[in-house]
Image (cartoon, helix red, strand yellow):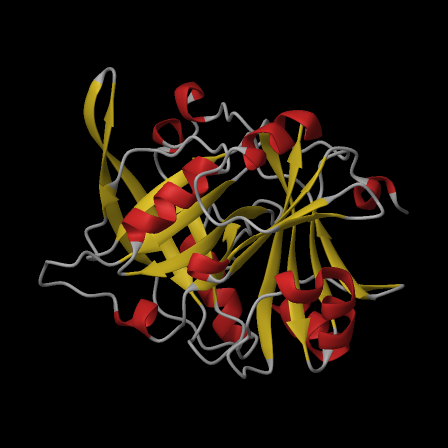
Amino acid sequence: MIMTDVRQATTADHVVINTLYDMDDAARCLASVGFCLTPRAHHTLGSINHLVVLDDSYLELVGLPREGEAIRKELLEYPKGINGLVFSENAPEQRYADLTLRGFRADLPQTFSRPVECEEGRYDALFTAVRLARDTYPAGRVYFCQHHTPELVWRNEWRHHDNTAYSLAGLLVVSTDPAGDAVAYGACINRTPEPEETGFRIRLPANRHLREQYPMDIRFVSENAYRHRYGDLGYDGSGRSSYFGAIRLRVQSMDALLAVIEVADSDMPHVQMADGALAVGIPLFNCLLEFVEVDDYASAT
């Protein structure tokens, strides 16, 4: 019997920032940059999180409670900083079978939940994840996530941010071998990377509203190219051969973002780039965010 492939087109679901045991400070930092964060939640796996919900995706702050018995060991295996790239999924069993058939090592699909407090009451947000093996990509955790209850994630009251952020534009992978890493990432999602001036990219459609004008690009660059663009704001890769170097976000108003940054009560070094982007470093948890109002990358052919 031939199994029908019911998987949807691969899109970027969210990006994860590992805070380890410093969730309070990390949440305060992102709030001071003008993000609205969801209330803190506790996964059945033992971790805690806050989300920055965007129109097409979200950022997830994930960490560990200072008290509690269940500990997610995979979070302790990485330093603070951008730690996870998550693709959307609607058929996790098929995804697992396809990955293993093509030689990838992956964990069996795992279903877990977290409670959500909202105006209507308390509910459980339910997910199923297929995670690639820890050593597949040195930059961090890569997995596929099915949302059984998306209505408990993309809620209107959490999608409005003082800095006017609304869309995930990209994730930057800094690598000693950008070409090789681009091919390796593309292989797990059946995508062929495209060369560009500073390295390579894999272009994905937006997750929630599959509109061409809001793609999400995974870009692969060398350490030299990364430092040339960001200078001292650049992430510390902790000696890894590759690491997630920056998250790129779209905003509706750069003026509104700058107004928030200027009064932030946290240490937020930032630089306005020649192309109009604003790079914001968050030293507390080794993170770099880049904001764009007019996204030149999205219109590039």
Residue 148 in percent (x, y) is at: 35, 38
Which of the two residues, 115 or 157, is positioned nearer the viewer here? 157
Residue visible at 71% across and 70% down in the picture: 182
Whether residue 120 is visible to the viewer of this picture, yes or no, is yes
Residue visible at 43% across and 39% down in the picture: 265
* Left or right placement of residue 27 versus residue 59 in this view: left
Residue 258 in percent (x, y) is at: 64, 33
Which of the two residues, 273 or 42, is positioned nearer the viewer here? 273
Which of the two residues, 230 or 14, is positioned nearer the viewer here? 230
Residue 110 appears in which quarter of the rendering? Answer: bottom left
The extreme top residue here reads: 120
Residue 197 appears in which quarter of the rendering? Answer: bottom right
Whether residue 7 is visible to the viewer of this picture, yes or no, is no
Residue visible at 11% across and 58% down in the picture: 67
* Left or right placement of residue 288 versus residue 30 in this view: right
* Left or right placement of residue 80 versus residue 170 in this view: left
Position of residue 192 relative to residue 61, above or below, is below
Residue visible at 88% across and 45% down in the picture: 300
Which of the two residues, 208 or 84, is positioned nearer the viewer here? 84
Position of residue 278 relative to residue 179, above or below, is above
The number of discs equals 0
* Left or right placement of residue 29 versus residue 88 in this view: left
Residue 77 in percent (x, y) is at: 35, 76
